[in-house]
Image: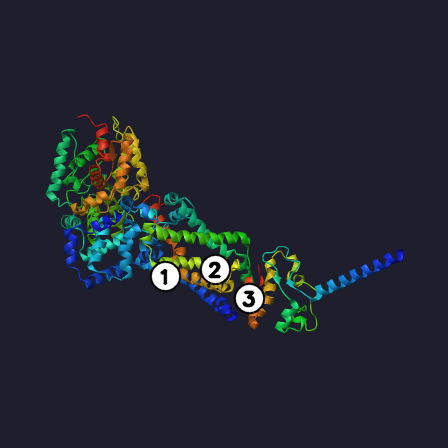
Amino acid sequence: MTESVSKESSLIADEGLDKGLARLTSEKIEKTIKTILTNETGARLKTYVSTCVHCGLCSDACHVYLSNRDPACSPVGKIKQTIWEIVKKKGKVDAQFIRRASEIAYTECNLCRRCAMYCPFGIDISYMILIVRRICHKLGVTPHYLQDTAQSHSATLNQMWVKDDEWVDTLQWQEEEAQDEIGDLRIPIDQEGADFFYSVIAPEPKFRAQLIYQAAVIFHSAGVSWTMPATPGWDNSDMCMFSGDNEMMGRLKKAHFETAMRLKVKKIVMGECGHAFRSVYDVGNRWLGFREPPIPIIHSIQFFYELLKEGRIKIAKKYAKTVTLHDPCNTVRGAGLHEMIRMIAHETCEKVIEMHPNREHNYCCNAGGGVINCGPPFKNKRVENNSIKADQLRNVKEQGAETVIAPCHNCHGGLEDIIHTYKLDMDLKFLGDIIYECMEKPEE
Amino acid sequence: MKQHSLKISLIITLIMMLMAAYSAHSQEEDVKTVEDDAFTEQMRPIVPFLHDEHNEIAEIAECGVCHHVYDDNGLLSEDETSEESQCSECHLPAKSKDKTELIKYYHNQCKNCHLQRNAGPIMCAECHVK
Amino acid sequence: MHAVYNFVSGPLLWVSFILFFGGSVYRIVSMVRMAKKTDPVVYHFWSLKYALRSIFHWIIPFASENMRKQPAMTIVTFAFHICLFIAPLFLFAHIILFKASWNISWMYLPDTVADIMTMIVIGACIFFLVRRLKLPEVKYVTSCSDYVILAIVAAPFITGFWTFHQLPGFRIMGIAHILSGEIMLAAIPFTRLSHMFFFPFTRGYMGSEFGAVRHARDW
């Protein structure tokens, strides 16, 4: 069975990979790899490759390996099939190798960094997978759907081909909707000097506009001073970070930070998204030369936590269904916000059941790291490769949990597919959903 | 009767004296092992060493080659030898607890000579036979 | 025999010491200098406090989640690494040789203890070998060099055990013991055995990123 998974996966047709493959020549492969290895890597890669003792202890860290028990899917197994070969052969690899490497790097690793906590040497495996992605990007062998998203970023500075007028229109539409509930509610657009700029990912205006509505209600009730920009730069998401298009990632982050500067806000508060947080807090800022983000970045988890702690929002009636918590990699292993998630859940919900392992040791949803953005061709594999998460969910469901709280868009996508495929029949909520539902709202 | 018993006693005494003299002689002349009273704790088996045989094979005639004496200036004495004393008397000064000091001298005495002459045992187990 | 002994215990020993110490210094210095040029991020984000926090959790048995998940491996690997260092450095026979050559000595272990430690190292090497051969996730990433490295480490202990117990052929084994010890020392800087001195750097950097930037534990 273990064999069949890896064989099957290499048969998945993908327009981006297949067409990219057709354009490759061995000279191009070698030249591209050499350029990247020489100009963009050095001591870290060298030390990681020469320090790894091939002990296999990282295997138990990976939800993909734990789900299919295929040694080719363990963290070090993926490294063996990709960067070790690339380094050993100094780029003299064939097109088929690049195709397989691309599929591994883009669809079998979420860059969740759990393996770095299981490797006794703390070898950063996700860093090496990102080098593979960088090579594949430069070679033009990226999964079609992911590349399409990156193109959108490049053309519109947002992830979902949202046009400038559609963006403002959506905000005004949500404002109107919300005014039915709270008459004097505003979604302040382009208000210079507000306390914070609320940034979201493009799927919010595109598919989940009610999240903007809910955030507006929460902010209005808390009486905070906020704004959203009218211009590109409003989207904090970043698939270019995951496709290996670092230059484009830099452009996106620059636009985002500059928008905050233009609005003269004190900080950026961002919606419940994990990868975007990683991009602005940890990766994109570094590409632009900032050790820390040039302006404070507060994730919604922390913002909600602060609002509750300061008593700016009050809970009218606790959420009645039993909930469980899914820790998103990028805000938990990436920012240590796990205790805040718990505080909010316990403040707002009647009963919370923990999944195990949790906090920094959570299992990824298998959607992160751009994997879900590789789209339908890889969906079945993505869901099959996370049966361990399904087991975890089933376990808490048997203990009575009905709702899964996952404060991350990618996690929602991944968990939704898992819940559906494994017939778990559980609700999926953002923290904002729960707070909006349970909070005291101004009477109007 | 009395005379008879006196004779027997005399003979026994004589035999015992002879035996004692013989055994004293054998201790002095026929050395079979390397031992030193300073080694109270045995870390390794005692080294078998057939003194006469060794010297015959090694063609050592002068006692001073091994049983050396150094004068106050640290110079090898030409006419004095030290076969009456144990190595530890000089080589474990001031009742030092560090026995490795004395061991060093024993090892250097045997091993360095063997290495110089390309003959004789040099590895641990060749001398400290179990 | 005397010529061979003189050669392996004389010039070869110096070659191995030079390769080991010189090689280690060279590898560390060149890595540190290269990092300054190619990976300045390591310098920008290095935090001594969090590096030590992480290292601490990974040098204490069972102080990390993965160690608790793999109790057999944890016990074996700690016993192995401890014995690997302690037994040769505090072996009576080795101290005697240091004393004879350089007139320095330090505390030593009772022979029985050293003997048990040697057996632990050999046993651990067998455990690692079986792991490589039997566990699919380890077998998959095992290459020929992994067996060679394992043999390089096991050899001085097997030959040392052989010589100490004076098993048949102990003279040849004694020479093999010295030689294999030298090979191991010389191999450390130039093989994956270099994890010996790269561990604090890789672990420390990951600890710094996790602790100072991501406010999360990495154990």
Frontmost residue, A444 versus B44: B44
The residue indicated by pointer 2 is C159
Residues under labels 3 and 2: Cα distance? 17 Å
The residue indicated by pointer 3 is B122
Residue C37 in picture, x, y percent from top left: 31, 59
Q: Quadrant of residue A329?
A: top left
* Label 2: few (<14), some (14–19) or many (≥20) C-alpha neighbours in 10 Å: many
Q: Chain of mark 1?
A: C
Q: Is residue A137 above or below residue A164?
A: below
Residue C165 in picture, x, y percent from top left: 53, 57
Q: Chain of mark 2?
A: C
* Label 3: few (<14), some (14–19) or many (≥20) C-alpha neighbours in 10 Å: many
The residue indicated by pointer 1 is C30
Q: Secondary structure at mark 1?
A: helix
Q: Secondary structure at mark 2?
A: helix
* Image side of residue C139 versus residue B27, left or right: left
Residues under labels 1 and 2: Cα distance? 34 Å
Determine if marks 3 and 2 fall on one subunit. no
Query: Of the residues shown, which amino acid type is indicated by label 3?
Result: Ile
* Label 1: few (<14), some (14–19) or many (≥20) C-alpha neighbours in 10 Å: few
* Image side of residue A56 versus residue A144, left or right: right
Determine if marks 1 and 3 fall on one subunit. no
Frontmost residue, A170 versus C125: C125
Q: Is residue A133 above or below residue A166?
A: below
Q: Chain of mark 3?
A: B
